[in-house]
Image: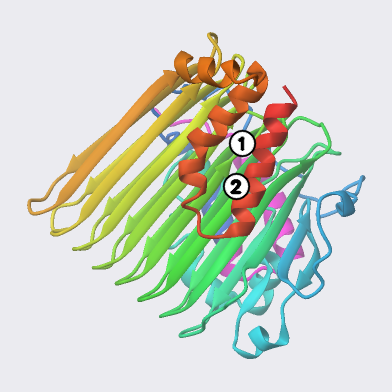
Amino acid sequence: MVTKEKQYVEYADALTAFSKGLGEPEWMTQLRLDSLDKIDELDLPVIERLRYNRWPIWQVPDLTGAPAQKAIDITEFIEDKADAARVIQAGNESVIETLPESLKEKGVIFTDIKTALREHPDLVKEAYMQQAVKADKNKVTAFHAAFMNSGLFLYVPKNVVVEEPLEAIFIQNSLVQDSFIKHVLIYADVNSNFNYVEKFLTAGQEKNPANILVEVVAKQGAQVKFSAVDQLGEQTTTYFNRAGHTFRDASIDWALGVMNNGSTIADFDTNLVGDGSQSDLKAVAISSGKQTQVIDSNVVSYGSHTIGNIFQHGVILDRATLTFNGIGHIIKGAKGSDAQQESRVLMLSDKARGDANPILLIDEYEVTAGHAASVGRVDPEEMYYLMSRGIAKSEAERLVIRGFLGSVISAIPLKSIRDELVETIERKLTSR
């Protein structure tokens, strides 16, 4: 048997010092070291229709714990919302954390992951890389578990309903060279109900990798509405993993705008473990320039009478590439479950490359499942009709795109995210 050379073990001492310097509990330090030891043994996750083994996503972050040499001016990225429930992070540090006293009194925790590990270690341990994603799932998750350098923890207690959205803004500091390894853990206790909104942005033009892992654990009866707009920079190569885990009668609704400017893998996975649980994933994406984006969406039904939907539309401009991979998997024993998906890609350039690959894996009887997929160009008759009414070609294209993406955007429940997506789409189209 040939053993692989372990190139990351040399970081063990620095990683231990980094963890101790943050005041992390012993179990977290050990998780880092165990993951470090496994990185080289594990395989890369399989992303259909993409070879990314040479992507620069393995840069070890700064482990000194020193502040970044150049700080981000956050004023150009945010609006003033003094009374909002929000966390804003610039690089690896939280710069703003606000939570109404009424929510604090109910036991809601909304803070950076470093603080949560110091002040609520047992609560974090219950969910951190235990259910939605295991640290040893693959090479990417092990690397993340070892070198995670910042993040967020949101906990909503049993039976608590939060009316106003909980908002997080993460600004990657590419004014300096450093890996952006962010972990977001959302823990929804029994019968809790809330909306969570997040944005990922980039400041600066340094070439940096991003390894971002978002976990949503929804316990029995919890209802989580998760909305996001991703706008990381052109010089950022990103592996995005958002993963959900549902207990009985819980639900996670995903509304995702994949609007990054650099090469991106967006890996979205939801495990419907509890009977009667469900997930509804809506995603829109735009690829432009020479960008490559792959959106890999998987919903796996383990419990009976679960519902898993995947609904995604994307637009490709210039020489860009966009691929939708979708898997609806109904495991043996998941009777009465339903898996549906739709993936559609619109290409606005002869040099664009698009693909849609829907897959259904059905291991049980007495279930329902279906899929639809299409990849095509703008209908010439639609363009002719619009231009015959005196509309310029560029504006006609924008109208067609808005109509194509609008069917997904209009289904997103949160108005602020709908508006944010429309503004981002307009900005990407007008900057061509």
Residue 187 visible within the image = yes
SS state under label 1: strand
Residue at x 46% of width, y 52% of height: 411
SS state under label 2: strand
Q: Is residue 429 magenta?
A: no
> Left or right: where does residue 75 sit relative to residue 312?
right
Within 10 Å of disc 1 (Cα), the crowding (few <14, some 14-19, many 20+) is: many
- Type of residue at label 1? Thr
Within 10 Å of disc 2 (Cα), the crowding (few <14, some 14-19, many 20+) is: many
Report the residue marked by disc 1.
238
Residue at x 30% of width, y 65% of height: 277
Look at the image and tell me in which quarter the N terminus lies. Answer: top left
Q: CA distance from mark 1 to mark 2?
A: 8 Å
Name of the residue lying farthest toward the top: 350
Question: What is the x, y in percent for residue 228?
Answer: 59, 52
User: Front-most of 299 and 193?
Assistant: 193
Q: From which residue to which does the magenta span run?
A: 1-29
Question: What is the x, y in percent for residue 348?
Answer: 55, 18
Look at the image and tell me in which quarter the C terminus lies. Answer: top right
Question: What is the x, y in percent for residue 392?
Answer: 67, 18
Q: Are marks 1 and 2 in contact (CB under 8 Å)?
A: yes
Q: Is residue 387 above or below residue 330?
A: above
Report the residue marked by disc 2.
212
User: Front-most of 106 and 15?
Assistant: 106
Name of the residue lying farthest toward the bottom: 105
- Type of residue at label 2? Ile
Question: What is the x, y in percent for residue 69?
Answer: 92, 45
Q: Is residue 239 above or below residue 121?
A: above
